[in-house]
Image (tube, rainbow, N blue to C red):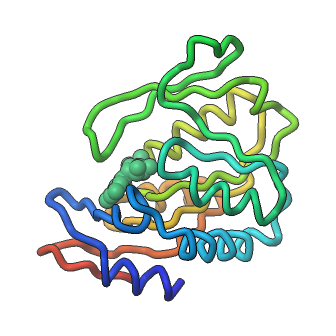
């Protein structure tokens, strides 16, 4: 997706440890016009898939996921990182955070992820695939079906994407970063 690639090269910043900062248009301040184009591109790439729900994980996956849900008029549900006191019927799993280097729990209500659901998962970044694996675990626990996973940015020098594709999962990434070595952003 050329518009996104240009924006990453223009405004993205490289950090130690292979972290790309895109907080001026995705992770903190958001560009809704770009986000709409991202939603349109996800809809195009998953056009041949049959799903009834869009799923993401808070917080940065919510904006692209809601764009997809809005365009397709489908419900969007996000896995929560803190369990609300009022959530009774829930499924949870543990995820290792790449950026924060710690483990956290994510949970989702059984009311909003059930065995009737065919799920498209959307998130901002794919790095080692820990968040994605956590989501797959939630989907499995619920007896739902995963139809595909879409990421705004995939860092191919980490290997989450490779592992997910080897498992036969339909993965689409709108911008693939081959390297951030020497603080130079190399986009495929
Ligand atoms: P993974 O679980 O695939 O290792 O990492 C994905 C999650 O970590 C994403 O949901 C994202 O929040 C965060 N993440 C991973 N790499 C980066 C990065 O380079 N920049 C930013 N801003 N977030 C990242």
Where is residue 184 drawn, in percent x and y? 19, 79
- Lateral position of residue 123 relative to residue 11, left or right: right
Which residue is rendered at x = 64% and y = 55% of the image? 65
x then y, percent, for residue 144: 77, 37
- Which of the 4 image quadrants contains residue 49? bottom right
Q: Could you tell me which residue is drawn at 61 percent across and 77 percent down?
A: 37
Decide: is 73 above or below 46: above
Residue 128 visible in image:
no
* Above or below for 95 versus 34: above
Quadrant for residue 9, please give it.
bottom left
Which quadrant is home to the C terminus?
A: bottom left
Q: Quadrant of the N terminus?
A: bottom right
Given residues 86 and 169, the one toward you in this image is 86
Res 130 visible: yes
State how many labels appear: 0
State the image coordinates of residue 147 (x, y, percent, origin top left): 74, 54
Specify whether 82 is left or right of 74.
left
Q: Is residue 30 left or right of residue 11?
A: right
* Residue at 54% from the left image edge and 55% from the top image edge: 123
Q: Quadrant of residue 64?
A: bottom right
Does 38 sit above or below residue 73?
A: below
Query: Could you say which is closer to the camera, residue 123 or residue 23?
Result: 23
Expressed as whole percent of the image width and height from the top left, the position of residue 79 reads: 59, 35
Residue drawn 48% across the image and 51% down it: 60
């Amino acid at each position: 997706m050329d518009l996104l690639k240009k924006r990453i090269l223009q405004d993205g910043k490289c950090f130690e440890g292979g972290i790309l900062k895109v907080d001026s248009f995705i992770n903190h301040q958001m560009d809704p016009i770009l986000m709409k184009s991202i939603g349109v591109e996800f809809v195009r790439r998953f056009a041949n898939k049959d799903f009834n729900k869009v799923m993401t994980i808070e917080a940065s996956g919510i904006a692209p996921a809601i764009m997809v849900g809005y365009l397709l008029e489908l419900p969007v549900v996000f896995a929560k990182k803190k369990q609300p006191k009022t959530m009774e019927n829930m499924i949870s799993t543990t995820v290792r955070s790449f950026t924060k280097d710690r483990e956290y729990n994510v949970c989702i209500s059984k009311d909003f992820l059930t065995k009737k659901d065919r799920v498209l998962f959307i998130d901002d970044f794919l790095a080692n695939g820990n968040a994605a694996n956590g989501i797959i675990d939630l989907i499995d626990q619920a007896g739902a079906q995963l139809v595909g996973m879409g990421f705004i940015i995939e860092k191919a020098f980490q290997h989450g994407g490779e592992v997910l594709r080897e498992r036969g999962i339909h993965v689409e990434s709108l911008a693939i970063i081959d390297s951030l070595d020497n603080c130079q952003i190399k986009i495929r």
